[in-house]
Image (cartoon, helix red, strand yellow):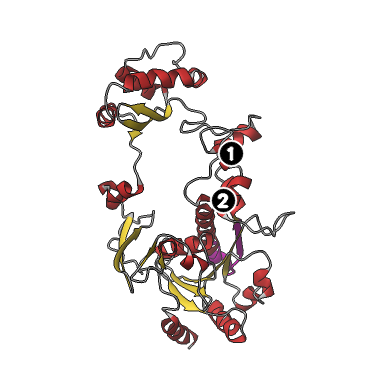
Amino acid sequence: MLGPLGDIVVLDLSRALAGPHAAQMLGDLGARVIKVEHPDGGDESRGWGPPFAGPDHDISTYFLAANRNKQSITVDLKSAEGKELIERLVRQSDVLVENFRTGVLDRLGFSAGRLHELNPRLVILSITGFGHDGPEGGRPGYDGIAQGEGGLMSLTGPSPEEPYRVGASIADLLAGIHGAYGVVGALYERERTGKGRVVRTSLLAAVTGVHAYHGTAWTVGGQVPAAGGNHHASIAPYGTFRCSDGMLQIAAANDGQWKKVATLLGIDPADPRYTTNRERFAHRDELIADMERALAAHDRAHWLARLAETGVPAGAIRSIDEVYAWEQTRSQGLVVEVEHPVLGKIELPGPPLRFDGLTDVEHSAPPTLGQDNDAVLAWLRERER
C-alpha cells in the first residue's frame, strides 16, 4: 500500500477493538499489518454479533469494522513453535501492538525487555483497561466499564439521575486512536535515537483524556459537571430544538451568531436575558422555550435552509443509513469498497484521514482466519535472507 508508513511492519497481537483499531489506523497509513490470531477461533470479536454476514451467517460485521488492511496468521503463543515464530516476526517488525491484561505477555515470555533484546528498534504499543501500574492496574477493562469509571457516563444522558453510555464503544476507539498517535511519535523519535520504546495507554486514560472543559470545570472551577441532555454545558443556544416535524440542531457559539438566530426567529437580541452567552446560559430554559415556540411554525427543511442562508451552524440528526447514503460522507472517502474472499464486494467505513496527492488508494478487506499463513511465512523467509 501507498502511504506515510509504507515501509513499516506492524505485528498485531491484539484482539477485540482498542488494539485492532490502533493497528487498523496504522494499516490505513500504509503499514503492513500482520494480525496474529489463535488457531482455535481467532480474535474473539469474530464471534461478536449480530449482525452476521455471509452464506453461513458466520462472519461478524463487528470484526469487519476493525481489521481492514491486515493479513491474518494463526499462531499458538503457548507452543514452542508459536513462540519461535513470534520471535522471528518480532525481529522483522517495527511495531508490536498488544492489549493483553497486565502481565500476560510477560508470562508468555515476551516482556518488553525480551522484545527489545530481540529487536532494539521495536516500538511496543500496550493498551490496558486501567493502566499498567497503580493500585488498580491489573483490572480487566471493557468499554462500558471504562466509560463509567472514567466519568463519561456521568456527563451523558438526559439528566444526572440517568447516566448513559455513549452509543459507540468510544473508550476502545479513543484508546486505539491515542495508541496509534503514540506509535507515530515513537517512530519519529526512533529516527533520531535508533531505539524503540514502549508506548502505553488505557481505556481509562482515553476517556479521561477527552474530558476537556468538563475536566477544568472541576480542576479549576470547582464545579462537578453533570449530564445535561442534548444541550452544551457552557454555550447557549447550542443543542437540539423541536420544530413542526421533528428535531434539528442549532449551534450559536458567539454573540454574532446569536443575533442572526434571534432575528430569524423573531426574538429580540437585546433582551437583557439573552445579550451575552453568560446571560443566555443562566436563562437557558426560557431561551429554549422561546426558540421552540418560533420553530414550531415550520418544518425542519425550512429552518435548515434559512439557517444556512444566515451562516449559522445547524444540522439534521441522521440515522446511520442516512449518513452512509449522504453524498458528503462519500465525497470525503469515508466509505471504501473492498473485495472480501467470502462476501465479495462490500463497503466499509473508511479512514478519517486524507493525504494530499494520495488518491485511489486500494484497501484490503478484513482477512479470514489464517488467510495469509503461507504469504506471511514466504515474506518472512525473504526478509531473513
Check the image and report above or below for 78 versus 340.
Answer: below
- Magenta residues span 188-201
Residue 286 vertical position relative to residue 197 in the rendered view, above or below: above
Residue located 57% across and 36% down the image: 214
The answer to which quarter of the image holds residue 126 is bottom right
Can the viewer see residue 165? yes
Mark 1, residue position: 154
The residue pinned by badge 2 equals 144
Q: Against 294, is 328 above or below?
A: below
How many numbered marks appear?
A: 2
Q: Secondary structure at mark 2?
A: helix
Query: Is disc 1 surrounded by few (<14), some (14 to 19) or many (20+) residues within 10 Å?
Result: many
Helix, strand or loop at disc 1? helix
Q: Amino acid at mark 1?
A: Ser
Q: Where does residue 76 sit, x and y in percent of width and height?
A: 57, 80
Q: Give neighbour class at mark 2: few <14, some 14-19, many 20+ (Cα, 10 Å).
A: many
Q: Which mark is residue 205?
A: none
Residue 194 colored magenta?
yes
Name, please, the residue furthest toward the right.
Answer: 135
Residue under the image location 43 percent in, 60 percent down: 50
Q: Amino acid at mark 2?
A: Gly
- Left or right: residue 80 versus residue 28 is right
Given residues 237 and 360, the one toward you in this image is: 237
Determine whether, in the image, residue 238 is placed left or right of residue 303: right
